[in-house]
Image: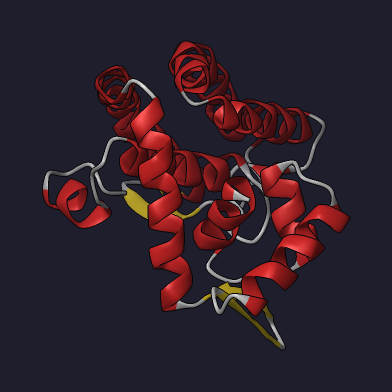
Amino acid sequence: MLEIGMALRLKGMAGVEGVAEASGCGADEVTAAFAQMIDAGHASETPRGFRLMPEGKIWLDGLLDEERAVIDVDAMNGVYERFCDHNDGFKYLVTDWQIKEVDGEQQLNDHTDDAYDAAIFARLDELDLAVAPVFADAATIAPRLTRYLERFAVALSALHDGDHTMLSAPLKDSYHTVWFEMHEELILLCGRNRADEAAAGRGA
């Protein structure tokens, strides 16, 4: 239930398919979980999808408290600090993917320069190799995070297969989407919050 609840929390609003993809749970399991969450007043269904209610966030915070009680939070904090060592590099990479400098001026990247885009992909491959041990250690501490390793691999494979939207598209399970959600997971598992991390320059 925690995986499904967290997937919905991180998406903000999502359908069964989106939560199933993110959580790795089957569609039937997600549907049943949503029904339980609605009955308990933890979630609601809207024309655009399902979303957590305020009571649902409190309930989910309780589940996270239970998870933190049985994992090595000090070790997870160490993992999070290592993740932060790579976070700025990834943000710069995504910015360079979206905007490029032409004749001294910044312009939207129209993706007609294959060599420029290929250089971005090479940087992503290098970053992925560097950060993989960090994510693997996170999954060792909190095994449900193993799903993120799979999602990163799927996004990277799709990107190399030609679907360039899988680098940063916000409405897809792109590399950037998975990165953002893993960041939030690490923040919460360390007992921190996004506002404090943003104030410290680590919130995005």
Furthest-left residue in this view:
200
Asked whether, in this view, residue 45 is left or right of residue 200, the answer is: right
Furthest-bottom residue in this view:
47
Residue 29 figure quarter: bottom right
Name above or below for residue 150 compared with residue 23: above
Q: Percent position (x, y) of residue 130?
A: 45, 12
Name above or below for residue 2 compared with residue 142: below
Q: Would you say residue 92 is visible in this rendering?
A: no
Q: Percent position (x, y) of residue 51?
A: 58, 74
Q: Residue at x 63, y 70 (%)?
A: 37
Q: Percent position (x, y) of residue 137?
A: 46, 14
Q: Residue at x 44, y 62 (%)?
A: 59
Number of numbered discs overlaid on the protein picture: 0
User: Which colour scheme appears in the figure?
Assistant: secondary structure
Q: Residue at x 28, y 35 (%)?
A: 190
Front residue of 174 and 57: 57
Front residue of 163 and 101: 163
Asked whether, in this view, residue 189 is left or right of residue 4, the answer is: left
Q: Would you say residue 163 is visible in this rendering?
A: yes
Asked whether, in this view, residue 29 is left or right of residue 130, the answer is: right
Q: Percent position (x, y) of residue 69?
A: 34, 33
Front residue of 23 and 161: 23
Q: Residue at x 77, y 42 (%)?
A: 163
